[in-house]
Amino acid sequence: MTDTPPPEPKSETSLLDRFNPGWAALVVSLLALILAASPFVPGGMTQPVRSALLNNPEILREASTRLQQQESAALQQAARAAISQHLTTLNQDPRDPAIGPHNARVTVVQFFDYRCPYCKQVAEPFMQLVEANPDVRFVFKEWPILDRDEPLSEYAARAALAAWHQGRYPAVHQALMSAQTIDQVSVDAILAANGVDMTRARADIANAETGQHLTDIMTLARNIGLSGTPTFIVNGELVNARSTDDLQAAIDAAQSGA
């Protein structure tokens, strides 16, 4: 196993949910902006502003939504810039499992962990999306970030890469995503059940090159500012995918050049 210590476990929420600030922080920011632009009245808020907020509390919700949109746009722009610096490694690392044409016009990259509940939830519909888009390249970034005391996610990622080397990746990937338990025994059973040569697999699992591959994925994720799994990137754009419908919309937009 790699000697790199795993990071703290991350949230498995959607990208937008991970980025949004709290309601209280938004309200404080809003009030600060209002007060900064209003005449000061000793002892409290200006009466017109106070009256407006009391009589129209929906203003706060509207302003909160606007602030969230602005922050999301800023984060998206920052992510786009970071991703552009690492686009080749992101889309075309020959070590990564991938499905679809190498020269596809659209590339979808997924960062995931086999113990991430939301990754498991979207796994089956995601593979249906792969089947529905044969002209799109789908890249699978094994990113085991949920390990703490035992490298269980890492072992599963190493095993999946071993299956990739034997042409057995899709079936093993789906079986790992469907598994209720992820440990060495259950992972080995999945490999064997899907026709993986276990002697070769054990050698690949323990191989230093496999560990380096996972370390490189970890470094890439940090360099482009990712914070949790699953994360989806379509043609260099982070996608707030609450469902595969959102991903399909992003694929369609990328296909049309929108």
Image (cartoon, rainbow, N blue to C red):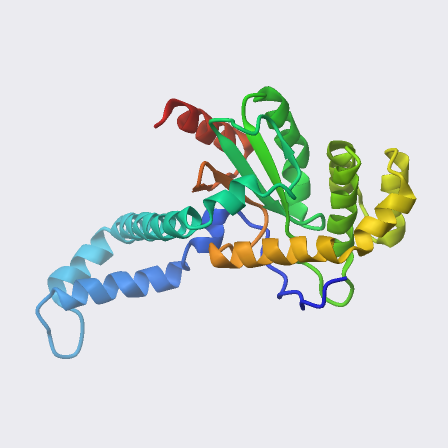
> Residue 225 at x, y = what percent?
47, 57
Q: Where is 245 relative to 111, above or below?
A: above
Residue 11: image quadrant is bottom right
Residue drawn at (64%, 52%) of the image = 143
Residue drawn at (86%, 50%) of the image = 202
Asked if residue 147 shows in the view, the reply is yes
Residue drawn at (62%, 65%) of the image = 7
Asked if residue 144 shows in the view, the reply is no
The extreme left residue here reads 39
Query: Quarter of the image containing the C terminus?
Result: top left
> Residue 24 at x, y = what percent?
38, 63
Position of 164 with respect to 237 (left or right) is right
Q: Nearer the viewer, residue 245 or 75?
A: 75
Residue drawn at (80%, 36%) of the image = 166
Q: Nearer the viewer, residue 33 or 234?
A: 234
> Residue 78 at x, y = what percent?
36, 53
Q: Nearer the viewer, residue 5 or 23?
A: 5
Q: Where is 120 relative to 103, above or below?
A: below
Query: Quarter of the image containing the N terminus?
Result: bottom right
Position of 47 with respect to 58 (left or right) is left
